[in-house]
Image: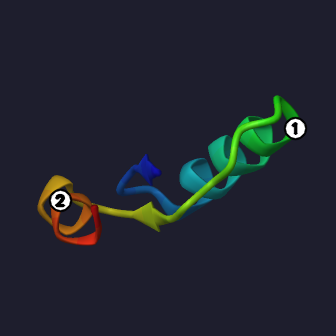
Amino acid sequence: MVVEDEIIVAVNLGQKLKKLGYELVGITSSGEEAIQKA
């Protein structure tokens, strides 16, 4: 999961992680939202 408040940065990080072989389970802009999704 990528937690980042700048959507462009979050999407870029997600793409890089996928290229490295990681599974992206979500993108969120806050820690609280990440905890709720986890």
Left or right: residue 20 versus residue 38 is right
Q: Residue at x 51, y 65 (%)?
A: 26
Q: Position of residue 15 (x, y in %)?
A: 78, 48
Q: Give the vertical position of 17 relative to 35 (above or below).
A: above
Left or right: residue 38 versus residue 27 is left
Left or right: residue 36 versus residue 29 is left
Which amino acid type is shown beneath numbered disc 2? Ile
Q: What is the tally of numbered marks visible in this picture?
A: 2
Q: Residue at x 79, y 44 (%)?
A: 18
Q: Furthest residue to the right?
A: 19
User: Which callout, 2 or 1, points at the residue further toward the start of the chain?
Assistant: 1
**SS for dot 1:** helix
Q: Furthest residue to the left?
A: 32
User: Tag 1: Cα neighbours inside 10 Å, few (<14), some, or many (≥20)?
Assistant: few
Q: Position of residue 36 (x, y in %)?
A: 17, 70
* Quarter of the view holding residue 21: top right
**SS for dot 2:** helix
Q: Report the residue marked by disc 1.
A: 19
Quarter containing the C terminus: bottom left
Q: Position of residue 12 (x, y in %)?
A: 70, 48
Which amino acid type is shown beneath numbered disc 1? Lys
Identify the disc placed on residue 32: none
Q: Position of residue 22 (x, y in %)?
A: 71, 38
Q: Residue at x 47, y 51 (%)?
A: 1
Q: Furthest residue to the top?
A: 20
Q: Give the vertical position of 4 relative to 37 (above or below).
A: above
Q: Give the vertical position of 16 relative to 5 (above or below).
A: above
Q: Report the residue marked by disc 2.
A: 35
